[in-house]
Image (tube, helix red, strand yellow):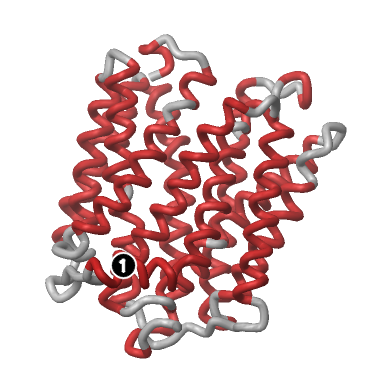
Amino acid sequence: MRASLSLTGDEAALFMVPFAVGFGIGCVMWFLVARQAGPRVLPPLALSLIGVANLIVVVADTTATAGTARFAVGLASAAFPAAAQSLISQAAAPGVRGRMTGGFGAAVVSGGVLGQTAVGALADLRDAPTALTILCGIAPLVCAVALRAALPATIGAGGGPPPARIPRLLRQQWPPIALAALLYGSYWLMLSELSEAVRADRFELTAAQTGLLPILGLAGVLTTLGGGWLTDRLGFRVPILATIALGVVALAVTIPAGGPLWLFAVGYGVFIAAYWGFLAPGAGEVAHRSHEGDRQPAMMVFYAAAWAGASIFGALGPLLPSWEAAAWVTLGAWVLAGAIAAWRFAGRAGVVMPASAGPIR
């Protein structure tokens, strides 16, 4: 896309913003759709729309078309995480929901990292448009058909809170909503500033070496699985506090300008791992605070907050003078999230409850 539209690296990075905005708006849109369509319908529908929108991105010949298509990809993508985790909540026994959610997160992490590698490898064999067409356009359409055929008909009734109860739902969910906006939003700020963080005058990395840094994201596989395992045994609030503390310490060691590359790589990798480690306990907190019939819309609100934060923090990136400034903003957001979590969760285990037990008060 960069080559076909003659974009610089910074201009190409801005295409994250329409995706994040679309995702945030999509969560609101799908929140309303979820009242009629359950998790058996939404994931295949979302995958189909993602495939079509990505095909438009591939053939786009103007930045306006590409930006609009990226917005559509974000809009469609918003339906999938919440619906998938609602499906997990329905299908999995209470004692293994954390591990199932962690497995879902591990698949997302692996797909994100390995997907980029697969696109690059296929682009080397053929060309970039072919790689994107097959892996980002056709593959989601095939997965949509397969998923629709595999899901049992007994799962996935629509439903959700009536409009009059939505303010109450928001009041119940505000702690995880605030954490999602701060943690996810600032994480995407750091991700968008990675090229600046490893600029040539700091570590003297080649372009090829810089391209290997996203592999650090695979550390998130361990923490999503570990976070799910801990959630099943300790409840979700202890892992929430632990992952935030881990992220704060890890990010802090990457900021000093004179630090060695190995320390930056370890700190950045652990920070990524902490970000992904929040997924299972964060989703558990949302589930714990909602009725079973409200769970899918509640997850939509959770992800809407996350991607609203991503769009705000992502738009803030170009306004900051340096990567160090972005790192300090991110560190402040994580410290604030830690303060909220300590205030609301400290001393409360948050043990996973049976679905029939109802929401937290």
Q: Quadrant of the C terminus?
A: bottom left
Q: Under tag 1, what secondary structure? A: helix
Instruction: State the residue at coordinates (43%, 47%).
Output: 307
Please say whether residue 150 is visible from this viewpoint: no
- Residue 12 image point, x, y percent: 46, 22
- Residue 63 image point, x, y percent: 34, 17
Instruction: State the residue at coordinates (69%, 25%).
Output: 321
- Residue 285 image point, x, y percent: 48, 73
Q: Quadrant of the N terminus?
A: top left
Rendered image quadrant of residue 259: top right
> For mark 1, what is the residue?
166
Query: In the rendered view, does 209 fall on the left or right side of 26?
Result: right
* Amino acid marked by disc 1: Ile
Asked whether 289 or 217 is in front, the reply is 289
Instruction: State the residue at coordinates (77%, 19%).
Output: 201
Placement of 253 over or under 221, stated as above or below? above
Asked whether 303 or 204 is in front, the reply is 303
Placement of 116 over or under 357, stated as above or below? above
